[in-house]
Amino acid sequence: MNAQALAEKINKLGFTPIALSEPTKREDGMIVITKGVHVQVPLRGDEPNVVRESSKGEFEFYDAQKTIGRLIDDLKSALQDEKAMAPLRNSD
């Protein structure tokens, strides 16, 4: 899967990536949306997934999605969860 092409689709839908890396022969790529939310771009296959880092440094992996609509729904959810956790991060 091509991270640049997916990032362009995500950007057109209102989510501005701040960084990206293409998949390599050994690891998945990623499209960084915020410090705590990114889209994992698979090395094999065409089903990316959203990943959110919790305030404790743990990762929540959303299901892999074949359609951009479902991926965007997961991205919205992760960003809302991240925003809700922001006050907790600031109090640590």
Image (cartoon, grey):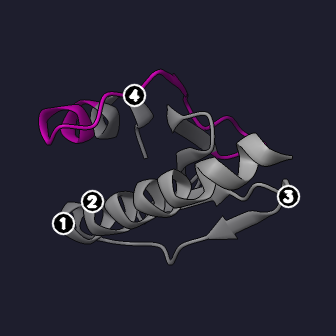
Looking at the image, which is closer to me, 64 or 18?
A: 18
Q: Tell which residue pokes out farthest to the front in this image.
A: 91
Label 1–label 4 contact, CB within 8 A: no
**Residue for badge 3:** 56
Between the C-alphas of marks 2 and 1, the distance is 5 Å
**Residue for badge 2:** 72
| For marks 2 and 4 on the same chain, the one whose residue lies earlier in the sequence | 4
Determine the image quadrant of residue 13: top left
Instruction: Tell whether position 53 is magenta.
Output: no
| For marks 3 and 4 on the same chain, the one whose residue lies earlier in the sequence | 4
| For marks 3 and 1 on the same chain, the one whose residue lies earlier in the sequence | 3
| For marks 1 and 4 on the same chain, the one whose residue lies earlier in the sequence | 4
**Residue 20 to residue 6: above or below:** above
> Element at badge 3?
loop
Q: Amino acid at mark 2?
A: Ile
Q: Amino acid at mark 3?
A: Lys
Drawn side of residue 75 relative to residue 92, left or right: left
Q: Amino acid at mark 4?
A: Pro
**Residue for badge 4:** 17
Between the C-alphas of marks 1 and 4, the distance is 17 Å
Q: Position of residue 81 (x, y in %)?
A: 50, 63
**Residue 38 to residue 77: above or below:** above
Drawn side of residue 69 relative to residue 59, left or right: left
Looking at the image, which is closer to me, 38 or 48?
A: 38
